[in-house]
Image: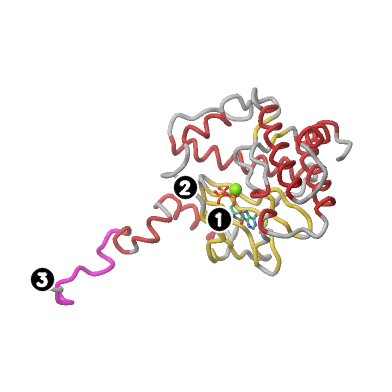
Amino acid sequence: MARRLSKRKRPRLEDKPQKERNPIAHRVFDDKTIDVLLHLLNNGVISSLDYPVSSGKESIVFRATTPEGFAAVKIFKYETSAFRRFAEYLEGDPRFTMKPTLRARVQVWAKKEFLNLKTCHGVGVRVPEPFAVRENVVVMEFIGENGVAAPRLEAITLEDPQAVAEDLVFQASKVYREARIVHADLSSFNVLFAEKPVIIDWAQGVSVRHPRAEEFLERDARNVAAFFSRQKVDVDSNAVLSAIRDGQGL
Ligand SMILES: Nc1ncnc2c1ncn2[C@@H]1O[C@H](COP(=O)(O)OP(=O)(O)OP(=O)(O)O)[C@@H](O)[C@H]1O
Ligand SMILES: [Mg+2]
């Protein structure tokens, strides 16, 4: 049986490398990401990182407190990111250059989310306002009430699905016609509902000049139509697609 080392012989905590000191924190944040978070804290962009709101394959989203209120901090993970999937949405987007390493690609991915949010916000599309981007971290407006994150459209029962469908299609149309972007993963999972729909998760969004932009737009229209059909709204993907393209509404 292994015998416990006496306290005197055990290595002191401060002598251990950081990953042994706190293996769980280390699995969530690599050293570089911790540096980025410290920079955001030291520069007053956030005053504390509060708790994870969501943990997915590609990213973890935290609520943070800021001097003005709250923010959402989206941290893209280096180790589990889908290198190939990134390429599909980066290659052919004239705004970005393809990067050879995973690390650089993840950072472009974060920049892409930030720029898409900024462009959409700039033309008045309802999205979280972006505050900062640094390496693999994007800081943006926290969508919620009293610090509680808004639910995803997918998770709630809508009182007036027709009105929400019209609103969301109007937003998507502004994205296409004014921001000149296609979201490329638009679905009820990437829309939060805070009295009105707010479109999130923009990293894969492409310029309309991307060679596959129209294909992505059609897929978005199909997803939106499928969701609202389940809510008994009389709509199909062609109607959604033409409303997005012509801006005339559903
Ligand atoms: N600005 C925000 N305000 C509040 N909550 C947010 C915000 N952005 C993201 N979230 C929460 O984090 C979740 C994941 O965010 P997002 O869809 O951008 O990332 P993702 O990489 O697609 O993650 P997943 O793989 O879990 O979908 C959202 O479903 C939402 O619950
Ligand atoms: Mg998502």
Quarter in which the N terminus is drawn: bottom left
Q: Quadrant of residue 246?
A: top right
Give the Cα separation between the discs numbered 3 and 1.
43 Å
For disc 3, the marked residue is 1
Q: Are marks 3 and 1 in contact (CB under 8 Å)?
A: no
For disc 2, the marked residue is 77
Magenta portion: prevailing SS class = loop
Q: Is mark 1 within 8 Å of ligand 1?
A: yes
Upstream in sequence: badge 3 or badge 1: 3
Q: How many marks?
A: 3
Highlighted range, magenta: 5-17
Q: Viewer-proximal residue, 215 or 129? A: 215
The image shows residue 172, relative to residue 97, as above or below, that is below
Give the Cα separation between the discs numbered 3 and 2.
39 Å
For disc 1, the marked residue is 61
Give the Cα separation between the discs numbered 1 and 2.
11 Å
